[in-house]
Image (cartoon, rainbow, N blue to C red):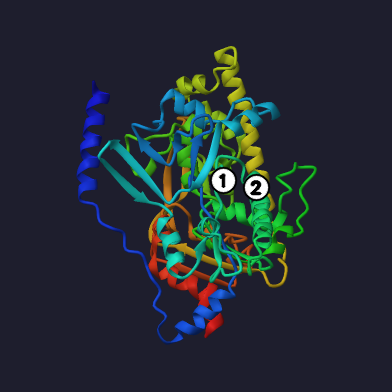
């Protein structure tokens, strides 16, 4: 009865909001007297690849095309239901056979431009995610590649193509980097096959949030994957061969405390309390652990004042966090239904969590190496400092509780020091791991950055204008 009442109230809310909705204002650059020069320069600019962040690609059930992530309503799977939990979670048994099965369950469809909530056939609301940045790039003169293919443009193509990299963001970012490597090679070959004037040019990457970790890993290691502690991939910047610039927007280069909160408490999309993805489901996803803050960024300590590492498997086991939370046992049983007993399900969850935490630490170590990139590869940062951002935790291992003890400058999810990739928080004079060509900070939060007109103006300066002036 209570669930039906909640559904009715939510449907009523959707109807009211959608009836009052307004069209979003998209920034359109005004070029004035330099219009001719800029348009001429744009023709010679590089194609763009947009890499979205965690949750930034819609996922559908591969068996029937039904949305599993990216839209909500009576025609989609609903968060926290048994079907959704089984579909979205990876297997607790991390072996090669299961990995292939998991990969075939869900299919990345497209970059998530908006989240649609439809609870009534005649009424829905759209929440903008990446629609603003895509629309703005189009207004600046870029043409979406899928439109080029549809219209069969080749030699006559007037301006650079815009590509959207859709990927399964649940996977390890090292695996997503492997897919990005394949994507870049494929699109480059397609442009050449179509005899496009952009076939021989390099790409610019514009990435947001976790997508920047994927892009950075790709630039360094190409499609080599994560490797192991004894057989690391070769850091030879092989991915940079086809890339000229990487523009990072709100990158969690050294992790985010938000990932910790989501792994422990679950995730509420757009802070809507009635929509929740359980901690046990998120706890099967490698990428979520790779978003955890590194030890130097996370000011975490226990009740004795001793420093605590949030990537330590023993800490998670001692605190019964995430997959090991007794309150998650019902969901754990759903996603581990192929395992014979409740005891074995818990044991497998414990093994998986420890493995993913160790791999996350390994992933961070690959990106934290300060190695000079090839000449000509540009690095640009757009980050937010518009909201206090959690920077410290107090963890009581006796009472099994934790609380936020401090906040610092950031975008509400990513600290400024993480976005900037500071090498040593104890000695800032050592600078960043990344040799930034330029770093710009905005008084904005994490998601609003990709809708920020000031950001777009600076983006076009990097991509187009400064070469035309």
Q: Mark 1 points at which residue?
A: 167
Quarter of image, res 316: top right
Residue 210: x %, y % from top left: 54, 51
Q: Which residue lies furthest to the top in this view?
A: 341
Crowding near the residue tagged with mark 2, few <14, some 14–19, many ≥20 C-alpha atoms within 10 Å? many
Query: Which of the 4 image quarters holds residue 170?
Result: top right
The N terminus sits in image quarter: top left
Q: Is mark 1 on a helix, strand or loop?
A: loop
Q: Which of marks 1 and 2 is nearer the N terminus?
A: 1
x 67%, y 53%: residue:
186
Q: Is mark 2 on a helix, strand or loop?
A: helix
Of residues 255 and 39, which is closer to you in this image? 39
Q: Which residue occupies the foreground of this view, 342 or 16? A: 16
* Vertical arrangement, residue 4 with respect to residue 365, above or below: above
Residue highlighted by disc 2: 179
Cβ atoms at labels 1 and 2 below 8 Å apart: yes
Q: Which of 224 and 150 is in front in this view?
A: 150
- Identify the mark at residue 425; answer none if there is no mark: none
Q: Position of residue 117 (x, y in %)?
A: 33, 41
Q: Nearer the viewer, residue 150 or 351?
A: 150
Task: Identify the residue at horizontal 37%, vertical 37% (top origin).
Answer: 72
Residue pictured at 39% horizontal, 31% vertical: 78
Whether residue 249 is visible, yes or no, is yes
- Residue 211 appears at what percent x and percent y? 55, 52
Q: Left or right: 447 with respect to 359?
A: left
């Amino acid at each position: 009865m209570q669930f039906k009442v909640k559904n009715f109230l939510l449907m009523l809310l959707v109807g009211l909001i959608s009836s009052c909705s307004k069209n979003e204002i998209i920034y359109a650059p005004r070029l004035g007297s330099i219009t001719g020069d800029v348009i001429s320069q744009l023709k010679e600019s590089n194609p763009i690849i947009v890499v979205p962040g965690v949750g930034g690609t819609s996922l559908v059930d591969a068996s029937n095309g039904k949305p599993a992530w990216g839209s909500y309503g009576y025609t989609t799977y609903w968060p926290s239901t048994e079907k959704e939990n089984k579909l979205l979670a990876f297997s607790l048994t991390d072996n090669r056979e299961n990995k292939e099965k998991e990969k075939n369950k869900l299919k990345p469809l497209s970059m998530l431009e908006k989240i649609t909530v439809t609870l009534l056939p005649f009424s829905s609301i759209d929440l903008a995610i990446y629609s603003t940045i895509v629309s703005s790039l189009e207004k600046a003169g870029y043409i979406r590649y899928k439109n080029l293919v549809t219209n069969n443009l080749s030699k006559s193509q007037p301006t650079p193509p815009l590509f959207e990299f859709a990927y399964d963001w649940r996977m390890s970012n090292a695996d997503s980097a492997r897919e990005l490597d394949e994507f870049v090679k494929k699109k480059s070959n397609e442009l050449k096959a179509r005899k496009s004037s952009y076939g021989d040019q390099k790409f610019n990457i514009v990435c947001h949030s976790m997508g920047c970790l994927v892009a950075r890993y790709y630039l360094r290691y190409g499609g080599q994957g994560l490797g192991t502690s004894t057989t690391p991939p070769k850091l030879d910047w092989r991915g940079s061969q086809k890339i000229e610039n990487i523009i990072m927007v709100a990158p969690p280069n050294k992790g985010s405390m938000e990932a910790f909160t989501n792994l422990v408490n679950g995730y509420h999309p757009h802070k809507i309390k009635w929509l929740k993805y359980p901690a046990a489901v998120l706890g099967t996803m490698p990428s979520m652990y790779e978003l955890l803050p590194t030890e130097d960024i996370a000011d975490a300590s226990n009740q004795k004042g001793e420093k605590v590492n949030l990537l330590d498997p023993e800490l998670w086991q001692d605190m019964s966090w995430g997959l090991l939370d007794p309150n998650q046992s019902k969901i754990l049983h759903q996603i581990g239904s192929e395992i014979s007993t409740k005891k074995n399900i818990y044991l497998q969850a414990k093994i998986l969590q420890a493995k993913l935490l160790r791999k996350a630490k390994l992933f961070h170590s690959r990106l934290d190496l300060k190695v000079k990139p090839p000449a000509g590869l540009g690095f640009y940062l757009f980050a937010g400092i518009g909201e206090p951002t959690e920077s410290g935790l107090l963890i009581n291992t006796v009472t099994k509780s934790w609380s936020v003890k401090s906040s610092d400058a950031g975008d509400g999810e990513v600290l400024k020091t993480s976005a900037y990739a500071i090498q040593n928080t104890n000695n800032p004079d050592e600078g960043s791991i990344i040799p930034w060509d330029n770093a710009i900070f905005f008084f904005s939060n994490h998601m609003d950055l990709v809708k920020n007109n000031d950001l777009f103006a600076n983006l076009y300066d990097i991509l187009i204008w400064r070469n035309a002036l």
